[in-house]
Amino acid sequence: MITLAWPWALAALPLPLLARLLPPARGAAGAALRLPPLQVAEAQDLADPPRRRRLALILGWLAWGLLVLAAARPEWLGEPVSLPLAGRDLMLAVDVSGSMEQADYLLAGRPANRLEVVKSVAGRFIDRRQGDRLGLILFGSRAYLQTPLTHDRQTVEQLLGEAVIGLAGRETAIGDAIGLAVKRLRDREDDNRVLILLTDGSQTAGTLGALEAARIAAEAGVRIYTIGIGGGTLGVQTPFGMLRRQASDLDPATLEAIAQVSGGRFFQATDTAQLEAIYEELDRLEPSERDQRTYRPLQSLYYWPAGAALGLVLIIAMVAGGGSGPHGARGGWRR
């Protein structure tokens, strides 16, 4: 739709009419330029005919109206556009080490390895984080930034879904993953920096210790929520059937210490339902901003009436001077 930024400028439309209705100025007689009778007659001869004067008057009023309209600053107001909402800066660090291939979970009633369950549950968590900037780190023997902080949740979810076990090595570098997350989060707004670290093992690789990295995160104002998966009964397929034993690869004490040092919380999920409940709890602890923020693009249009007014002024000049020229109204040269 078209709007006027300064609609009060339209009040200037009747100014020429008011100026015409004002009484002539009266004052002392001053110097005047007097023409001889011959030049007065010549000027009368050169006067425009009535039709031309009416046309010039109409065009003059139209030009004035266009100038006033340009002064009112017409603008085209576009359709509302949603802005990225101001939410949290939330980094996901997902373990893709060799132990994540253990198929000790159930997903939709069938056995599934740990990474498959994480992809399913974390994918729904990502989809709910409207307004947050999300990033993804995959770590094994090394930590890699898969996605920088972005509002594009679909891309983060897609790249998580494409993660494969062993992509970053078979061991577990928890401290390096935390350090990389802190590097990406430390320049963001205070009180909105969150790291969700998900692993099924203990620190077995990397150059930065897990607790040392947690202290660095605390100094940078990054809260870490640690999620330990596994640690329950582990199914092992043998020629004699499925045998179950207690998994011992998880280090819950270290994960809990990481959370406490950084002001976060530690969770442990031994099955899919618990993992889903943990992500729902994270939604409660770190809610997304839901305020609607939109803007409507504006495009100035004042130059259209201003240009049209200029064109009309040129036409008026041509109309007013149509009968005059070096040959005069009757042709021929005059002296």
Image (cartoon, grey):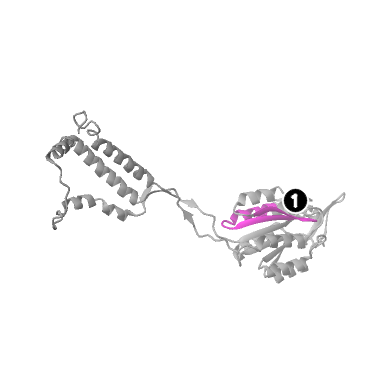
Residue 316 location (% of width, % of height): 27, 39
Q: Nearer the viewer, residue 81 or 251?
A: 81
Residue 65 location (% of width, % of height): 28, 46
Q: Is residue 114 toward the left or the right of residue 335 in the image?
A: right
Residue 226 location (% of width, % of height): 71, 64
Q: Is residue 229 toward the left or the right of residue 305 in the image?
A: right
Q: Nearer the viewer, residue 34 or 57?
A: 34
Q: Which residue is mark 1?
A: 111
The magenta span reads 119-148
Residue ID at (65%, 51%): 156
In which quadrant of the rendered image does the C terminus lie?
top left
The stretch drawn in magenta includes residue 106: no
Task: For residue 309, say whether it is visible.
Answer: yes
Q: In the image, is residue 64 above or below residue 126?
A: above
Task: For residue 269, say whether it is visible.
Answer: no
Quadrant of the image occupied by residue 9: bottom left
Q: In the image, is residue 331 above or below residue 263?
A: above
Quadrant of the image occupied by residue 181: bottom right
Q: How many marks?
A: 1
Outermost residue, top side: 332
Q: In the image, is residue 201 above or below residue 162?
A: below
Q: Residues within 10 Å of mark 1 (few under 14, many from 20)?
A: some
Residue ID at (62%, 49%): 154
Residue ID at (23%, 52%): 15
Outermost residue, front side: 335
Q: In the image, is residue 95 above or below residue 306?
A: below
Q: In the rendered structure, which amino acid carries the disc numbered 1?
A: Pro
Query: Which element type, helix, strand or loop, lies under badge 1?
Result: strand
The stretch drawn in magenta includes residue 137: yes
Outermost residue, right side: 239
Residue ID at (66%, 54%): 148
Residue 88 location (% of width, % of height): 60, 61
